[in-house]
Amino acid sequence: MSQSPWNDEFFGVKVLLDINQVIAEIEATGTLDALEALRVQYLGKQGSVSALLKTLGGMTPEQRQVEGPKIHALREAVTAELATRKAALETAALDARLAAETVDLTLPAPEAPKGSVHPVSQVMDELAEIFADLGFAVATGPEIEDDWHNFTALNMPETHPARAMHDTFYFPDRNEAGREMLLRTHTSPVQIRAMLREGAPLRVIAPGRVYRSDSDATHTPMFHQVEGLVIDKGIHLGHLKWTLETFLKAYFERDDIVLRLRPSYFPFTEPSVEVDVGYSIEGGRRVVGGSGDAPGHAWMEVLGSGMVNRKVIAFGGLDPDEWQGFAFGIGIDRLAMLKYGMNDLRAFFDGDVRWLAHYGFAALDVPTLSGGVGTPA
Ligand code: 2U9
């Protein structure tokens, strides 16, 4: 392609194309951007080679036979030259990058991001550990319950006002047995199922999610409870008090926990007691320990409990003249807040990883009694 017939007016198109010049120009480009500009200049829609191609349309067949191969050869030569230069520029760019970038293989590898254990899960593990030491198994059950297991078997018949107090989320349809279906309002149905399934004697804790149609700064529609149930012969309030005291000492890792039992009412227990612990304020935080009557101290309610109502023992398929028991219920979220110092319940369920990074626990920091439950290493 040395000589060029297209340095002049050519079929109405002013062309200034010297193939050697074009090639020299392409070879001289120093950047991929400049090369792209040349490609557009020659081969683009408005490009000069494209303009030449268009002139073929205005030629006689004889002229086209002569000029056609030349114009196509020109286009191919320019295309090939652009490709060659592009490859050369890309190789040069890669070589420059390789020369500039170095990898120091002696540097420590970047740390992989680590998740953390949610405080609720951590406290559930701590509770399982503490109660396992006292001979309790962990029982679980469905979060979607029927009203018999959630209410009736717990001595809350259809008309019982406590049913209304529970602000229950109901499902629109009943189950095959015609029972109303709901999201469990407490974990108590788990213990009913455990009694029916396993009989007596029985020692279980039932930790898990529960639901109530309730939402403000201190109530979320879903929260966590742990309930405990002991069924055996000759069980009395003394067993209840010792068990709760032993549990709270282990959980708060303090020997000076003082309990105050106040009479109360729950349909499922008779008699019923509410349990307070003494605490003081240190550095703006509640610190559990000491008598609530001591100077600078006060009482705070932490859980509800009582001797299992005879009717509930019978609903669980056992003879209340033969078997007695005690039961208790605690809010896990509140228990976590008290021990680990969070002050807003809602943050527990926001799923904010920054909150978790602050309050979460290392995945391998499994609570053990010997290691001090919940004490990070
Ligand atoms: C069976 C028999 C008895 C469980 C009990 C409480 C008292 C109680 C509350 C504490 C704070 C719920 O999370 S909370 O809002 N619970 O006060 N729970 S006795 O009694 C039972 C359970 C199951 C078969």
Image: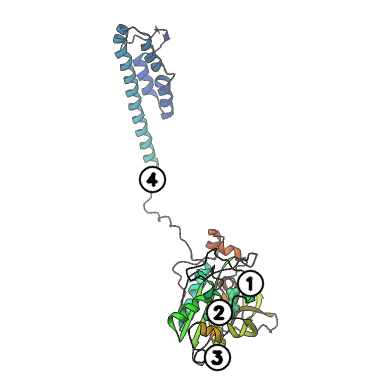
Name the residue carrying label 2.
Answer: 154
Question: What residue occupies the far right of the structure in this picture?
Answer: 295
Q: Residues within 10 Å of mark 2 (few under 14, many from 20)?
A: many
- Marks 3 and 2, how far apart at CA: 20 Å
* Residue drawn at the location 61% of the way across and 84% of the way down: 272
The amino acid at mark 2 is Leu
**Between 146 and 191, which is closer to the camera in this rendering?**
146
Q: Position of residue 235 (x, y in %)?
A: 52, 90
Is label 2 within 8 A of ligand 1 (CB to nearest ligand atom)? yes
Q: Look at the image and tell me whether residue 230 can be seen.
A: yes
Element carrying mark 4: loop
Total numbered circles: 4
Q: Position of residue 145 (x, y in %)?
A: 51, 70
* Residue drawn at the location 61% of the way across and 71% of the way down: 166
First-in-chain label (4 vs 1): 4
Name the residue carrying label 4.
Answer: 102
Q: Position of residue 264 (x, y in %)?
A: 65, 83
Q: Which mark is residue 164?
A: 1
Element carrying mark 2: helix
